[in-house]
Amino acid sequence: MKRTMMSLIGVAVALAAVSGVAAVAAPDGGAKEAPGSGTRLPVQRSALLCPAPTSSEVGETTYTAFAPKGAAAGADAKKGTAKLLPAGTVRDVGSGDDGKSGKKQGGKGGKAQDSGADATGQTVAPRDTKPVVPLQEAGKPVTVTTDRSDAPALVGTADGTLAPGWTVQQTTSVAAGSGRGLLGLSCTTPDTTFWFPGVSTATDRQDYVHLTNPDSTPAVVDLELHGKDGSLTGSAGEDIAVPPHTTVPVLLSTLTTGPTTNAALHVVAREGRVGAAVQASDTKLGSDWLPAAADPAPSVVLPGIPKDATSVRLVAIAPGESDADLKVQLATPTGLITPAGLESLHLKSGMTTAVDLKDITKGEAGSLVLTPSEGGSKAPVAAALRVTRGKGDKQEMAFIPATRPVEKRATAADNRDQGSTLSLVASEKGKDAKVTVTASAGSGGGTPVSKTYTVKGGTSLDIAPPRPQGLKGGYALTVEPESGSGPVYAARMLARPQGGVPAFTVQPLPDDRGSVVVPTAGQDLSVLTD
């Protein structure tokens, strides 16, 4: 008989690797004990994926990379690496030569079209090997700008002391055309499932989901669209192959037989893992990125509706087997209120519901809070908002998906001297949130500044965030709840007007998952095997 030792800590590290964190740091004097659960340690490796920004000839994209300083206690903050590399690009799946055909390009068993075809038969553009936005130092952002219309998607990793909280913001300004506007996205972490309420296949919209594979093995993805009567796609979105280190854009309208204005997209990687984000372009309302919503949950919070929003549309789905009955509330600067005529919302299982909330904020910034109705089921829901500012032909849209609370820290990169608004919401009445907001050094110089804010339970607070002293260039914001703080959610809006159009974009700020709790083994967990 041989004796195999099985450590609970080893299991925890393995689980962290599965969720996208390859390793955690050993205790370093600054590790914090999580009461009753183990030790919280900084991650030592993280991955990010940035989709191809734009095909416009009049677009300019800025990438801003940042890692919070002091994330790994007791370590030299300059150690570690963080860089992104260009990904290969596969021809649009489902778009055909004219962008309208429903026939897939490539995919499993597809025919190679040129010498650049990969093993799946998909045509892959050659990759550049020069790193993009390499980060050398924690606490100081790095900014790179490009006006290339063929700028590629990016895949990359950070390790050592640059891994905890590594954030890259992709901000694109398109001056003219149907895709004009300000498009912003926090580059995503790879996963196996994503929900995107708020997509559309209507004739005035062109929505692409960008699927990016960070790994050295192929990924296979299924896409399913849900409308007001249920599934819209059938087998049309199945078996989409995403080659290693490659991105695949899929035009959503090619997955259905008819236009649908309000839909929810479910992305599932059956093999491997991918990053996913939706680029939405509207003929009247401009364009922006729709990030994935937080994992479906009985209660969700959508923070950061601007005070001057002229139109707000809620799109939600109950993806489980049970219907959901929700209480709809708006967290305002003075408390929670119920929108007139929308005391409750019923979601049928597997069906997408859209509600026009119009100018719900009435001149006061707010955040939407959805909770189970009293006596109703606690079925999980996924939700997002489409928010519009401006009027007539001077309108611009952005999206606010439901987001996770900030548990330890959240980060927003690419803030400028003006134009940033930080939204904080304490969603539970009677549970105040106290957070410290830190403005980093600027990419070209400046001294960090911190300020503490208290958000009364059941209210939303919009602030012009602190700025570094002597700011030069762009800077990052970190949001850190203090010990004992109530639940807090956050979002950052960037406003950069373009010729009378109130161009803007909103990024939710979920917890950056820069640390994990490693359970402490309290007993002998040895396993005896023959």
Image: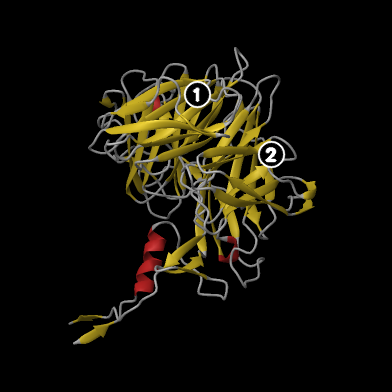
Q: Nearer the viewer, residue 142 or 12?
A: 12
> Could you say where residue 22 lies in the image, as x and y percent from the top left?
45, 63
Q: Answer with mark 1 or mark 2, whichever residue precedes in sequence.
A: 1
Report the disc number at residue 245: none
Label 2 neighbour load within 10 Å: few <14, some 14-19, many 20+: few
**Image height check: is 526 above or below 15?**
below
Q: Amino acid at mark 2?
A: Ala
> Could you say where residue 353 lies in the image, as x and y percent from the top left?
35, 25
**Residue 115 appears in which quarter of the rendering?**
top left
The quadrant in which the N terminus is found is bottom left
Q: Nearer the viewer, residue 455 or 59?
A: 455
Q: Amino acid at mark 1?
A: Val
Q: Which residue is mark 1?
A: 312
Q: Give the residue at x 57% y 24%.
A: 309
Kindly give the residue lying farthest to the front in the view shown. 430
Report the disc number at residue 464: 2
**Image height check: is 223 above or below 130?**
above
Q: Indicate left or right for 172 with 191 as reference.
A: right
Q: Give the residue at x 69% y 39%.
A: 464
Q: Indicate left or right for 119 with 448 as reference.
A: left
Residue 254 seen in this snapshot:
no
The quadrant in which the C terminus is found is bottom left
The residues tagged by marks 1 and 2 sit, at their Cα atoms, a distance apart of 22 Å
**Image height check: is 393 above or below 238?**
above
Secondary structure beneath label 2: loop
Label 1 neighbour load within 10 Å: few <14, some 14-19, many 20+: many
Q: Give the residue at x 38% y 54%.
A: 217
Kindly give the residue lying farthest to the right in the view shown. 470
**Residue 8 appears in which quarter of the rendering?**
bottom left
> Could you say where residue 417 lies in the image, as x and y percent from the top left?
75, 40
